[in-house]
Image (cartoon, rainbow, N blue to C red):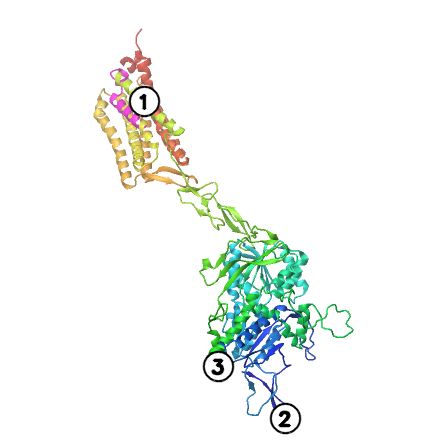
Amino acid sequence: MVLLVVSFSQADEQVCRQMGDPENPQLSQDGNMVLGGIFSFYSSWKDRMDTYLHKPLPLQCTSLNFRGFQFAQAMLFAIEEINNSTDLLPGVSLGYKIYDECGSIARSVRVALALATDNTVVAALSKTPCTRPSQVQAIIGETSSSPCMAIATVLGPFYIPMISHFATCACLSDKTKYPSFLRTIPSDYYQSRALAHLVKHFGWSWVGAIRNNDDYGNNGMAIFTETAQQLGICLEYSVSFFRTDPSDKIQEIIDIVKTSTSKVIVAFMSHMDMDVLIHVLSQHNLTEYQWIGSEGWIVDSQIAAMDIHHILDGAIGLSIPKAHVNGLREFMLDVKSLNSSNNGLFTEFWEALFNCKFRQSASSADIQRECTGDEDLTGVQNSYTDMSLMPIFNNVYKGVYAVAHALHNILKCNKTCNKAVPLDPFTILQHIKNIYFKTKEGDEVYFDENGDPAAKYDIINWQPRENGAVEFVTVGLYDASLAAEKQLHLQNKSLIWARNSKQVPVSICSEKCPPGTRKVLQKGRPVCCYDCIRCAEGEISNITDSVTCVRCLPEYWSNERRDACIKKEAVFLSYEEIMGALLTAASVFGTCTTAGVALIFFKHRKTPIVRANNSELSFLLLFSLILCFLCSLTFIGQPSEWSCMLRHVAFGITFVLCISCVLGKTILVLMAFRATRPDSNMKLFGHTQQRLCVLGFTLIQVIICIIWLTISPPFPFKNFKEFKDKIILECALGSAVGYWAVLGYIGILAILCFIFAFLARKLPDNFNEAKFITFSMLIFCAVWITFIPAYVSSPGKFSVAVEIFAILASSFGLLICIFIPKCYIILMKPEKNTKKNMMGKKASH
């Protein structure tokens, strides 16, 4: 119910009157029930400067819009069908009142209020409330989202149903703000998301966006932007304009497009705004861009006809699925009934439709063709005769039928309707929300809880033909009711792209980062703009556009391309390599040489030079040297649990055995030649004592090794730190204290041996082997003192080689210094191998 203004005439008569100038419909017809219609017969108006010193004049509308007439004709066709039907609303006639809103939101609100009230002045008694019921049962329209929002805001409190055929803004689904708004076209929430998924499908991550500066464009683009960000798509620019904006504003948009690097433009616009934009784009011949269109213009043949420079060729976008209403085209083309109107609007429409002019006076000599009012549209080709928007006409058609079915249910119609049933807007609204029916073509009509229909779109591609015309080819389908992975479906059809190309255009800010690299964002730019940085050593990326590089497992290393982890080379001192082979040869040579010396000594065991200093210790020393040479072989080859323990224990024990023998020989020499009485010291350090000395010194090392092996033995270890791309297989010491205890004990014995040998250096020359022992201990100590820093600083297998070299060098030092001089005498100078010569006595001549 709408409150009317109470005024008083000069005769003090109380009347109800609507404020302001009355609004008269452009098309009207009486009926038992009346439907309202609001369409844009004009798309713009002339600017004016209001001074507010006097009452503003009505809008002067411009730019006749044939689409508005088509929508109105679709509404009239549906009403005529219903009135002629015996199944729907039998005995009830539907009337209509259709207004032109001239593309103006303010005028939309005015005509909506005119539909909701009555323009007539009605006398009212003092006790009668000045209210009138709504003069229409529902309103069909409007075409754009912003006017619908304004109208729905005004009509919402009165619950007057409003069904739009083309207002797609997702904001209109908010029933708290627009409780009486419904529509037969899907919400832009689904269209915007579908456009984003379409862009993603073709691999475009760097796009520009142009939108209407109204609720349709701003809300639709906001949802597109949000979805695009979720899908990894970036907008280089997002600009807006309205068709009434000054030319310099549109020129700014053209400049932005020209300077951009993106080659794809998403245009979320109505056909009226696209009319303005395409005209300016044609002046600049911007043909190298791929256009993505919303349903507002993508199947508009009028836009295609204006695109004489083929700027939009190859455009792809979403449209309402194709539909056909039997008889609607013929009804639209029969416009003779409109000629009976004396309205100046339809005079202008008729003249524009047939390119003629009604004669105003006999002196109109400049008129080339004169309108008769009997013109026929047969053969006329213009935007009015184009039926490419049949799906939208079908939406108008379904909106009218939705109201009719709701009224049919309210009036409990069967063969007749109960016209006495009171009608109020709220009841009509509730019944419309709950209707479900099928049109004569089989289309299902229903509304969800938000007053929206099911969201389905055709994917349209602009494909130019040889005659210069553009064909709107359906190349796919988007159905929001399906599972996410099945919503977008492209048919196996060849697509045409910008500049009539069959190759999908590329629009990215940065090239894809290949495997082996990672993305690094460029400072101050969107996430789609990045540099590709090669993965560091030991890291890989095996996918395109990786944001991180993954570090390989410790036993693996990155290949040269950094796209796969390969197993690291295991490095250890092996017999096959040159270094290992040389050390093995030296060890075998030392073993054979020592064995040869032992054979020589055994063969000449009864000669004075062999018997002179306890041959038993000499043979034991030779045996220990053989073990020393052989223990170096345990250091070569791949480390294992047993080899790691064996190499260090064998090395420690054999060397102590060796040094113990040398120490025993040195002590024996000292005691033999410093004795005050013959055999006095020899009794103190006889064979038994010598054996016990060697056994005792060796046993101490054995105990140290047992403790080491018990507490924390050596074990095989994979060293990943020494080399980045290699694994060093080595033996960890387990307990470093145990290792250095073994070496330290050997060092103590070597120092003692050196001290005793040094004290015995001046004994009789011919027999004195103490000086040879001194030299051997010097070599031994020098080798092992230099071994420590060399061992610590040598990486990997080289530390093992250093240890083997130290073992071999010290073993050769002992062998050469102690035994080679004696072998020389035995083999080369046998005449000196006598007791007299050993005692230092010279033969008499």
In the displayed structure, would residue 470 be above or below residue 511? below
Mark 1 vs mark 3: in front:
3
Image-quadrant location for residue 810:
top left
The residue under label 3 is which amino acid type? Cys
How far apart marks 1 and 3 lie (CA) works out to: 126 Å
Q: CA distance from mark 2 to mark 3?
A: 43 Å
Callout 1 touching callout 3 (CB < 8 Å): no
At horizontal 28% and vertical 36% (from top left) the residue drawn is 705
Question: Which mark is on residue 12?
Answer: 2
Q: Which residues are magenta?
A: 605-628
Q: Is residue 607 magenta?
A: yes
Q: Name which residue type carries label 2.
A: Asp
Between 840 and 461, the one nearer to me in the picture = 461
Read off the residue under disc 1.
592
- Residue 460, horizontal then vertical, whole percent: 55, 59
Pick whichever, 558 or 574, lies toward us: 558
570 in magenta: no
Disc 2 is placed on an element classified as loop
Q: Of discs 2 and 1, which sits in the foreground?
A: 2
Q: In the rendering, at what x and y percent does residue 453 appear? A: 49, 68
User: Which amino acid, mark 1?
Assistant: Cys
Q: CA distance from mark 2 to mark 1?
A: 145 Å
- Label 3, on which residue? 417
